[in-house]
Image (cartoon, rainbow, N blue to C red):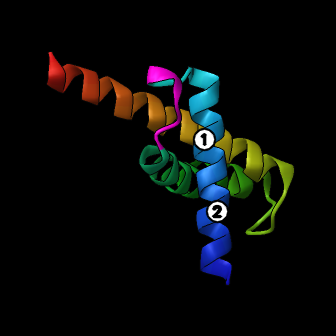
Amino acid sequence: MLILGLILFGMLIGALAQLILGRKRGRIDWTMAIIAGLVGSFVGGLLASLLNGDGLELRPSGIIGSIVGAIIVTAIWRFVGDRSKA
């Protein structure tokens, strides 16, 4: 059940990152949302939580770090994807 919750949280964070950066073709790419959300949440959320001294508990610093991490992963994904098409 925890794994399903983490995937759902990552998907929501990834979708939020796409909404913040702007959607391509007017829709959310759910594959990118899941991957960017999970990777961004792991790296950004964990790093923000540990730097604030919150440990591994769910705190606002971890959620904000997750969103920032997902935005960075989504931006890099789009940049690499656009460069490979050109």
Q: x, y percentage for residue 76?
A: 38, 31
Most extreme residue toward the top is 86
Front residue of 25/38: it is 25
Most extreme residue toward the front is 26
Front residue of 18/54: it is 18
Secondary structure of the residue carrying tag 2 is helix
Residue at 54% from the left image edge and 53% from the top image edge: 43
State which quadrant residue 1 falls in. bottom right
Q: In 3D space, how far apart are the residues under numbered discs 2 and 1 (Cα atoms)? A: 11 Å
- Residue 46 seen by the camera: no
Residue 15 has which mark? Answer: 1
Q: x, y percentage for residue 69?
A: 57, 41
Secondary structure of the residue carrying tag 1 is helix
Question: What residue sits right under mark 2 in the picture?
Answer: 8
- Is the magenta region chiefly helix, strand or loop? loop
Q: Earlier in the sequence, mark 2 or mark 1?
A: 2
What amino acid type is highlighted by mark number 1? Ala
Query: Around disc 1, counting alpha carbons within 10 Å, would you say few (fewer than 14), some (14 to 19), or many (20 or more)?
Result: many
In the rendered image, the vertical position of residue 67 relative to residue 9, given as above or below: above
Q: x, y percentage for residue 78?
A: 36, 28
What amino acid type is highlighted by mark number 2? Leu
Most extreme residue toward the bottom is 1
Q: Is residue 15 left or right of residue 31?
A: right
Query: Around disc 2, counting alpha carbons within 10 Å, would you say few (fewer than 14), some (14 to 19), or many (20 or more)?
Result: some
In the rendered image, the vertical position of residue 23 relative to residue 71, given as above or below: above
In the rendered image, the vertical position of residue 18 relative to residue 69, given as above or below: above
Quadrant housing the C terminus: top left
- Residue 29 seen by the camera: yes
Q: Are marks 2 and 1 in contact (CB under 8 Å)?
A: no
Highlighted magenta segment, given as a residue range: 25-29
In the rendered image, the vertical position of residue 32 relative to residue 86, given as above or below: below
